[in-house]
Image (cartoon, grey):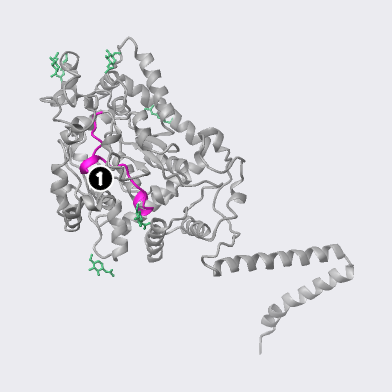
Amino acid sequence: MLSPSKRWRKEQPLHSLTSCVRRVLCSRRHSLWILLVLVLVCIAFQTFVARQARNDKGNEVPQLHFTVNKPQSFSLDSILGNFWSNSAETVSPGLSSSLHSEKEADSHLQNEDFATTPNRFSTKRSYKSTVSKFRHFSSSKFLPSSSIPGKCKEKTHIVFLKTHKTASSTILNILYRFGESRNLTFALPLNKNSQLFYPFYFAPHFVEGVTSHRISEFHIMCNHMRFRKSEVAKVMPRDTFYFSILRNPVSMMESIFIYYKSIPAFHGKRTLDDFFNSSKTHYNASLVNNHYAHNILAFDFGLNNSATFDSPDLEKQVSDAIFAIERDFGLVLISEYFEESMVLLRRSLCWSLEDVASFKLNSRSDRTRRKLSPETADKIKKWNALDWRIYLHFNATFWQKLDTVIGRQQLEEEVSELRALQAELAGVCLKDGGAVEPSKIKDAGLKPFQYGAAVIQGYNLNADMDNRTREMCERLILPELQYTERVFVRQFPEKAPWHKQALNTGQAWPRAKRRFTHLKMPQSALSQHNKPTAP
Ligand SMILES: *[C@@H]1O[C@H](CO)[C@@H](O)[C@H](O)[C@H]1NC(C)=O
Ligand SMILES: *[C@@H]1O[C@H](CO)[C@@H](O)[C@H](O)[C@H]1NC(C)=O
Ligand SMILES: *[C@@H]1O[C@H](CO)[C@@H](O)[C@H](O)[C@H]1NC(C)=O
Ligand SMILES: *[C@@H]1O[C@H](CO)[C@@H](O)[C@H](O)[C@H]1NC(C)=O
Ligand SMILES: *[C@@H]1O[C@H](CO)[C@@H](O)[C@H](O)[C@H]1NC(C)=O
Ligand SMILES: *[C@@H]1O[C@H](CO)[C@@H](O)[C@H](O)[C@H]1NC(C)=O
């Protein structure tokens, strides 16, 4: 027997419903009745469609779902050129993303799940979700359209001008992983070199597969080169997206001073102040590799790097440089705002946030960082006046772009989502939770290249991972030279049969180190072709 109170609770809804229905009927408000029926039919239909779509995997039935996007204004085409391939109209994100294919909808739902799970770092469930999400994205050919509203097609024709000491190795890793998972073709340096014969101006025959016509279409070019648009355009498709990254020239020069200690300009100089005390009288721009010491950003972009603050034509050089970079590049990122840069990048490329998740690669141990006095910083700004002005300009336009394209609030949300994802990945992949000194790296094949007086940190992987997770994690931390080799081997298996074995046994590294020839141009690349002009 039910207690009276329980019986009351049990009967109450029924009772109230019937009375309600009676009231509606008796009052003869037919219009209200019809409305109620319509609403019920609507809800039933929607539920049916949603269930149908979920049950029927692989079927391309459009599905209604809700996204976590905040409303934003998305008339981006006008702002950033041909951003989204297919949206002439301004679309409201809620509406535009409500009709997606099943697979896309799936990734939306995963993101929704990700965004609304508060304590996702420690739970087993979230571990699995990250890993499966990464697998999903790295194997899927579908656009993981994580909260990019509107229709856009992910860009796969890309040139990244890799600059020096600007976190560009981390971006290289992002591009390698993206390309590898989609079977894209990279424009790699000839003969397994690690760079496109920097510091020579780029020429098409520097790229493996160009002269031999072995490759018909290149997707991504991202190794070190001295940029020359007209020549790069001969190799890359017309719709290629060009981007690069700048760093504050002050901290950049501190980094370069430690890393490129052996160049003539820095030879015998204990500190940067020593260098500046003698640079006016002793700096010789025509000595090989001295360009590292002077306006290296301008140099990498293919520009004249000779300007200092007292050059009579500094203003003209500055405006010419800015004009050239803005003409040739769709996007210029800022190293100091790396996560913000990644958010902007993935929107420009129509990639998912997962595609731009990364661990910091090729970064220096704090042991080899030097604090600079304000006086020294000032000397650097004057000496590298051209770089400094370029940086100030593109730092300003970077933030303008962020404001127009994303807005500060949405930016903040995406940046923290990216950081959370990266923290979660670190928890899954990394043994010590973060970077370690090179001497502590156990797997020789995962040790980053050491150079100059800098100590470049690396990572150790967790021990107990299944093969697929390990594979994912390995790709995230694989240093630049090893990854370049790996991509080369994949693309030109016939050119490196011995290589594959070497990579598997972790023996590839010493060989790669020997081939690190960024300081001189191999004659083999020059012999049968026009000699590129030395800078
Ligand atoms: C990747 O591309 C190569 C040729 O470029 C092709 O032979 C191979 O089948 C492709 N693999 C996949 C998984 O699409
Ligand atoms: C640089 O030169 C100035 C004077 O010309 C001198 O006072 C200063 O100590 C020098 N600094 C170094 C690091 O040699
Ligand atoms: C600069 O280096 C070049 C090339 O080695 C040399 O010919 C020239 O004499 C040097 N100039 C000065 C001022 O030392
Ligand atoms: C770079 O500019 C300086 C001054 O404007 C000029 O003297 C020099 O010849 C230029 N160098 C090259 C390689 O064009
Ligand atoms: C770069 O831009 C940001 C945002 O406007 C600003 O806070 C920062 O001071 C700028 N950096 C430099 C070196 O001017
Ligand atoms: C995992 O990889 C190891 C060697 O790398 C192999 O021996 C093992 O069979 C793999 N396990 C699975 C489940 O594929």
Q: Is 206 one of the magenta-colored residues?
A: no
Spot occupied by residue 511 in the image (x, y as percentages of width and height): 14, 47
- Magenta residues (range): 178-200
Give me the residue at 22% from left, 24% from top: 534
Q: Dot 1, crowdedness within 10 Å: few (<14), some or many (≥20)?
A: many
Badge 1 is on which residue? 480
Give me the residue at 74% from left, 77% from top: 14
**Frontmost residue, 350 versus 15:** 350
Instruction: Please tell me in which quarter of the rendered image ligand 3 is found.
Output: top left
| Residue, far bottom | 1
Q: Is 196 one of the magenta-colored residues?
A: yes
Spot occupied by residue 190 in the image (x, y as percentages of width and height): 24, 40
Quarter of the image where the N terminus is located: bottom right
Question: Seen in the image, is 446 located left or right of residue 385?
Answer: left
Residue 378, quarter of picture: top left
Spot occupied by residue 180 in the image (x, y as percentages of width and height): 34, 52
Quarter of the image where the C terminus is located: top left
Question: Seen in the image, is 533 located left or right of residue 10?
Answer: left
Residue 394, quarter of picture: top left
Question: Seen in the image, is 280 located left or right of residue 295?
Answer: left
